[in-house]
Amino acid sequence: MLAETFISAALLATTALAAPAPNPIQLMTRAPNPGIVITKCTQPGVLALAYDDGPYQYTSKLVDILDAAGAKATFFWTGTLYGCIYNQAAAVKKAFASGHQLASHTWTHSHMASMSAAQITAEMTKVETAFANLIGKKPLYMRPPYLETGGQVLPVLKSMNYKVITDDVDTGDWNNQTPAQSEAKFTQAGAGGNGHIPLMHEVYSSTVNTLTPWLINWAKQNNLRLVTVAECLGDKGGEYQAQNFPVQSGPFSC
């Protein structure tokens, strides 16, 4: 009896040793849940440059600046805020081909918190259609205009499987703050801990031509990798819906 007990215990111990331990990297990189507000990265050593309100006249140059530095960024785009998205088709395709993340900022950049579920859905699906037409993919990430997440916003976005991004550093470029003032916010926030997801807007020349090069240099000085929002959340490869769509040649209209 004693021998049998010993053998059973030994077998259990062997089985336990043979069972693979959880991979800590996999535990750290599980994809974020949809419909929950995310303000910053879940990993250290990164910075996720994130630009709102495009595509616009500066988009192509911004992509060039980022590409020259080997940086990846995320673009939260609207359908009609600064003209019809289809009018910037070349810039959209260029950003996607360069490996930047394209995400939704809704079709009209309206106040979502006061919208019905049907209206919110329409705002999102119109952007999806435009992305599908231009790059053959539909996004799974979005940043709500004015960072509004009340009302029906989160329930609807959760049902549509969207990861909802806000920010943890507001550059204030939308509020006439200078690049120097924005830079001071990053210096104050520091480069330690999990990476930042800033609120920036590519529709301002100063953000593209002054703040972005400064941030690239700041990241380099602090040994931070410039990655997409999805990658900084451990969700690289999860930027878009799995299905591919045929790219269309148009003509399109908004």
Image (spheres, rainbow, N blue to C red):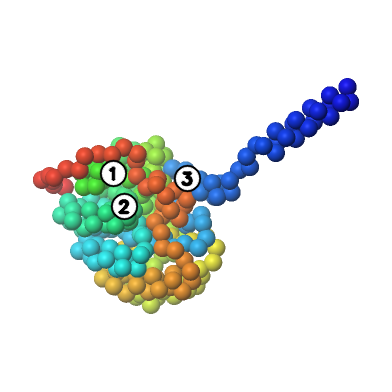
- Badge number at residue 61: none
Q: Point out residue 141 in the picture as x, y percentages from the top left corner.
A: 37, 48
Residue 28 shown left or right of residue 184 in the figure? right
Could you tell me which residue is drawn at 34 percent across and 72 percent down? Answer: 213
- Kindly indicate the quadrant of the structure image that contains residue 201: bottom left
Residue of label 1: 137
- Seen from the viewer's position, the closer of residues 122 and 34 is 34
The three-letter amino acid code for the residue at tag 1 is: Lys
Residue 92 shown left or right of residue 243 in the figure? left
Could you tell me which residue is drawn at 80 percent across and 31 percent down? Answer: 9
Label 1 or label 3, whichever comes before in sequence order: 3
Alpha-carbon neighbours of circle 3 within 10 Å: few (<14), some, or many (≥20)?
some
Label 2 or label 3, whichever comes before in sequence order: 3
Q: Point out residue 47 in the picture as x, y percentages from the top left corner.
A: 44, 63
Residue of label 3: 31
The three-letter amino acid code for the residue at tag 2 is: Leu
Q: CA distance from mark 2 to mark 1?
A: 9 Å
Residue of label 2: 102
- Seen from the viewer's position, the closer of residues 237 and 32 is 237
Q: CA distance from mark 2 to mark 3?
A: 17 Å
Could you tell me which residue is drawn at 21 percent across and 39 percent down? Answer: 246
Residue 66 seen in the figure: yes
The three-letter amino acid code for the residue at tag 3 is: Ala
Alpha-carbon neighbours of circle 1 within 10 Å: few (<14), some, or many (≥20)?
many
Label 2 or label 1, whichever comes before in sequence order: 2
The image shows residue 118, relative to residue 135, as above or below, that is above
Q: CA distance from mark 1 to mark 3?
A: 19 Å
- Seen from the viewer's position, the closer of residues 242 and 187 is 242
- Cβ–Cβ under 8 Å for marks 2 and 1: yes
